[in-house]
Image (tube, rainbow, N blue to C red):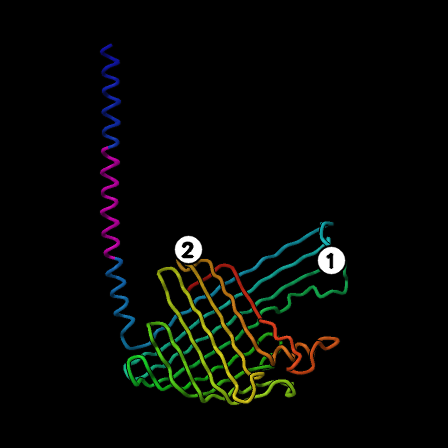
């Protein structure tokens, strides 16, 4: 009987000691987390002061996505013997010089994607990787500060594709006006005097014109999250058919060191491009701006991301 009592007392004592030890460890852990939280807040405050100093700010991040698949005797689909693949990447980079009296902001956006569909039962199909998404955009904005949030500015922006038909079409916007910075990392450009140069072999569809340029860009890093959203629009004074708008968004989340996951998507409306595409169809689905089906253009890329 005494042995049983001693064993029970020993078990109760061990359980009590273990519970006490666990509570102590939980308390110490909470204390360390509070210290780390305070240290992170101090580090964020120091980084904000560093970001506010005059000088260059540079950075880049991108997304890589891809897949390869093969089917053999998969009769449930129309083409039972197929090899297919998809690969693409995006790059967002910036180099901004911020001074007390002026700024010079430069950015680059590239989104390229290739697809492959090889029907092994069709000996004459195209079994090579072919360009699918093709976006190239580079922007340079210079401004002289009038107030803390308003500046007189000049902008040059070039957009085209680079895989198959470089500069056909290509768009070069050059203009002057004002840049507004209502909050940190948000840039709003309004240039009422802007000329939209359009380069293309098809002069019957693509036409340069004078108009207004509006750009809004927001680029921000929240811890391991990188986010960039950009809207660029041109409103032609000659005809709304010559106007265009593009909205691109890039998001990446760092999981380990510089590697993470990323997502990019874009929307675009351009009636000149829509008409040019319609004229290339056999038979042509439109012959003028009046009967063109100006469908919304879209793209997206999902995959691994890397922060440079």
Q: How many angstroms separate mark 2 from mark 1 (CA)? A: 39 Å
Locate the N terminus by quadrant. Answer: top left
Badge 2 or badge 1: first in the primary sequence: 1
Instruction: Name the residue located 25 percent from the left edge and 32 percent from the top edge.
Output: 19
- Residue 127 drawn at (x, y percent): 69, 64
Instruction: Name the residue located 35 percent from the left edge and 60 percent from the top edge.
Output: 223
Which image quarter: residue 7? Answer: top left
Neighbor class of circle 2 (other Cα within 10 Å; few <14, some 14-19, many 20+) is some
Name the residue nearer the viewer: 205 or 116. 205
Q: Pointer 2: what residue?
A: 255
Name the residue nearer the viewer: 223 or 193. 193
Neighbor class of circle 1 (other Cα within 10 Å; few <14, some 14-19, many 20+) is some
Instruction: Name the residue located 62 percent from the left edge and 77 percent from the top edge.
Output: 274
Main SS category, magenta section? helix
Q: What's drawn in magenta, residue-wise?
A: 20-39
- Residue 23 drawn at (x, y percent): 24, 37
Q: Pointer 1: what residue?
A: 120
- Residue 251 drawn at (x, y percent): 45, 63
- Residue 277 drawn at (x, y percent): 66, 77
């Amino acid at each position: 009987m005494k042995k049983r009592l001693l064993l029970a007392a020993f078990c109760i004592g061990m359980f009590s000691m273990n519970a006490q030890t666990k509570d102590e460890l939980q308390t110490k852990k909470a204390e360390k987390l509070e210290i780390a939280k305070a240290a992170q807040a101090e580090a964020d405050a120091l980084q904000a002061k560093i970001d506010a100093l005059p000088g260059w700010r540079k950075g880049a991040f991108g997304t890589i996505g891809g897949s390869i698949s093969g089917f053999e005797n998969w009769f449930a689909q129309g083409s039972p013997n197929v090899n297919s693949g998809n690969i693409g990447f995006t790059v967002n980079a910036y180099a901004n010089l911020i001074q007390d009296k002026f700024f010079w902001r430069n950015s680059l956006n590239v989104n390229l994607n290739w697809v492959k569909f090889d029907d092994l039962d069709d000996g004459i199909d195209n079994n090579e990787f072919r360009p699918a998404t093709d976006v190239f955009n580079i922007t340079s904005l210079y401004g002289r500060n009038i107030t803390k949030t308003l500046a007189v500015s000049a902008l040059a922006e070039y957009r085209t594709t680079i895989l198959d038909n470089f500069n056909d079409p290509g768009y070069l916007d050059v203009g002057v006006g004002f840049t507004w910075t209502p909050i940190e990392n948000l840039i709003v450009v309004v240039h009422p005097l802007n000329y939209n140069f359009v380069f293309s072999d098809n002069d019957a569809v693509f036409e340069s014109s004078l108009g207004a340029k509006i750009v809004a860009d927001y680029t921000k890093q929240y811890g391991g999250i990188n986010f960039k959203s950009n809207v660029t629009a041109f409103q032609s004074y000659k005809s709304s058919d010559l106007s265009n708008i593009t909205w691109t968004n890039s998001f990446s989340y760092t999981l380990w060191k510089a590697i993470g996951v990323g997502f990019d998507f874009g929307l675009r409306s351009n009636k000149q491009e829509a008409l040019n595409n319609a004229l290339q169809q056999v038979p042509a689905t439109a012959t003028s701006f009046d009967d063109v089906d100006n469908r919304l253009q879209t793209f997206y890329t999902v995959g691994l991301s890397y922060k440079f």
